[in-house]
Amino acid sequence: MNTPTPTASAESEINRLHDEVVRLSAESKQSLLGALAAAWKAGRLLIEEKQRVRRTMGPGAWLLWLEQRFHGSDRTAQKYMRLAQTVDDVATLQGMSLRQIYFQLGIATEPKSRLESVKVYPLPARIRLAEKLLEEVRPCLDASFATTEQLESCRRDLRRLYEQLRRLFEPAANVPKKAGIVQVKGTR
């Protein structure tokens, strides 16, 4: 009868533990992807429900609806919706936790503890305002929600802003005229 030597016993335990690490790691990755997919799907459904609630009950009813019918907080609902608006295919984010993805996408999260709190500087005002503007303009861009009259109203309301921003993005319009810069013929 062969009795295992201490070395063989240690090797066996090391390999058993290695196999367990591989198995648990694979399960963990599947769980992360499952949580991500569930959050993304919930975000999609929350976006649709928000539109329906606002359309049928008015804009002020959304937070009340969330409070009464959603098991999570309104901040969690906002995160799910931002995730769904920002990410087209959750499979591209495989292997990352929701917290890591929120951080990558610039979605605010609470630190796990005060010791982990990272100093995050506020975004420039133009970015915060652009995000708010995009939130307000989104219904105008949704063809199923906006009527022709609503689209024309949005265009009239935003025409002045468009003219100003156009100068930043169109090559012929982005040369500062008042700055005293002389354009050499044949260059841009």
Image (spheres, rainbow, N blue to C red):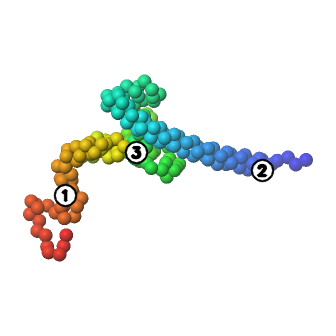
Q: Which residue is mark 2?
A: 8
Q: Residue at x 45, y 26 (%)?
A: 69
On the image, the x and y values in percent for residue 41 come to: 49, 41
Quadrant assignment, res 181: bottom left
- What amino acid is labelled 3 in the image? Gln
Marker disc for residue 85: 3
Q: Which residue is mark 1?
A: 167
Could one spot residue 92 in this view of the protein? yes
Quadrant assignment, res 116: top left
Look at discs 3 and 2 and give the one toward the viewer: 3
The quadrant the C terminus occupies is bottom left
Left or right? Give the position of 65 relative to 135.
right
Query: Residue most toward the top?
Result: 68
Q: Residue at x 14, y 61 (%)?
A: 176
169 lies above or below 4: below
- What amino acid is labelled 1 in the image? Arg
Question: Mark 2 Cα within 10 Å, few/some/many (few <14, many 20+)?
Answer: few
Mark before the other along the chain sequence, 3 or 1: 3
Query: Residue most toward the front?
Result: 148
- What amino acid is labelled 2 in the image? Ala
Mark before the other along the chain sequence, 3 or 2: 2
